[in-house]
Image (spheres, grey):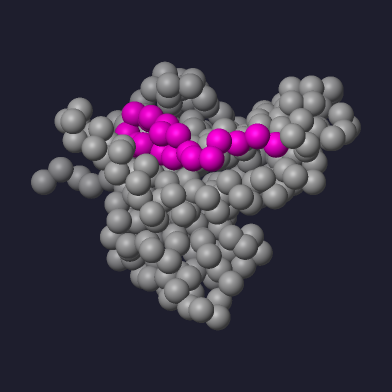
Amino acid sequence: MPECSVLDRLPSPDGHLRAVGSALRRLRSPDDPLTKVVLARSLVLGARGPIPPAALLHRLVASDPAGNGFCVDLTPAGAPHLGRTLVGSSPELLVRRSGREVSCFPLAGTAARVPDPEQDAAVAQSLTRSVKDLGEHAIVVEGLRKSLGALCEDLRAPSAPQLVRAPALWHLGTPVTGTLRSERTTALDLALALHPTAAVCGHPRAHARDAIAEIEGDRGFYAGAVGWCDAQGDGEWMVAIRCGEIAADRRSIRVFAGGGIVAQSDPQAELDETSAKFTPMLTALGATEHAPA
């Protein structure tokens, strides 16, 4: 992997704080139906040599406990995506179909891990008691259950989320399973029905999408869905997060991180959360968000 360093921040940290503040004004307004919106920011890194997509994918998969990874040539999307590559390692399963069995594993609610084991355990337990994070997570699970309810029977989900351990982060996650009403519903049909979930968009979906477009603008392929579907309708789709888009000349990459904003959110904490979420990509690239002093 060539040496990489941050060239630009889109938006700047101050700009992201302002964006979160703008969202909070809407979320705290009694007249606005918006209850959650996911806002993201990105870092543009330059490289001293070509970034090899396959090598970056290998690093990401090797450091992911579940071994998840994706590498997608974006050329079929046409200009201006010719020669670009989306590479990432997503912790979040959007939907999986095997026969009539359907499973999802949404994540919402995040805390950065710390090196000290006792402090790290305390961070994890604090996350499980966080009113803000539990509320954000409940919005995601309820939205997913509602979307699946039209397509599945016998939906099953635990009453409380579980802790999900990642190398740099703790997450709250809830496994949701069900049985399809019709075998003709494919994994792609399910992905189209579910995406974008409240975990990467917000709630209500239409209001959150409008807010993202107004506050953040176009986020490209970030937070999309990436996966596969076979001729029998089985397949697996992941949420395209913890990822980066490599430029056509492979001399730069734009990496993304976002977080769910609810009425109880603190702007600085939300900024810090995105910094923590950059860690897997930056570590694989051998870079840091801020240059050492």
Q: Position of residue 277 (x, y in %)?
A: 37, 42
Q: Nearer the viewer, residue 210 or 129?
A: 129
Q: Is residue 124 in sight in this rendering?
A: yes
Residue at x 74%, y 34% (from the top left corner): 154
Q: Relative to 25, does residue 93 appear above or below in the rendering?
A: above
Q: Position of residue 102 (x, y in %)?
A: 71, 30
- Examine the structure image and report whether residue 164 is included in the region drawn in magenta: yes
Residue sitting farthest toward the front: 159
Q: Relative to 33, does residue 281 appear above or below in the rendering?
A: above
Residue sitting farthest toward the left: 293
Q: Is 50 situated left or right of 226 in this image? A: left
Q: Is residue 45 in sight in this rendering?
A: no
Quarter holding residue 32:
bottom right
Q: Which residues are magenta?
A: 155-172
- Examine the structure image and report whether residue 202 is included in the region drawn in magenta: no
Q: Position of residue 254 (x, y in %)?
A: 44, 45
Q: Nearer the viewer, residue 108 or 79?
A: 108
Residue at x 87%, y 29% (from the top left corner): 183
Q: Relative to 142, does residue 11 appear above or below in the rendering?
A: below
Q: Relative to 138, does residue 172 appear above or below in the rendering?
A: above
Q: Nearer the viewer, residue 219 or 121?
A: 121
Q: Position of residue 172 (x, y in %)?
A: 44, 40
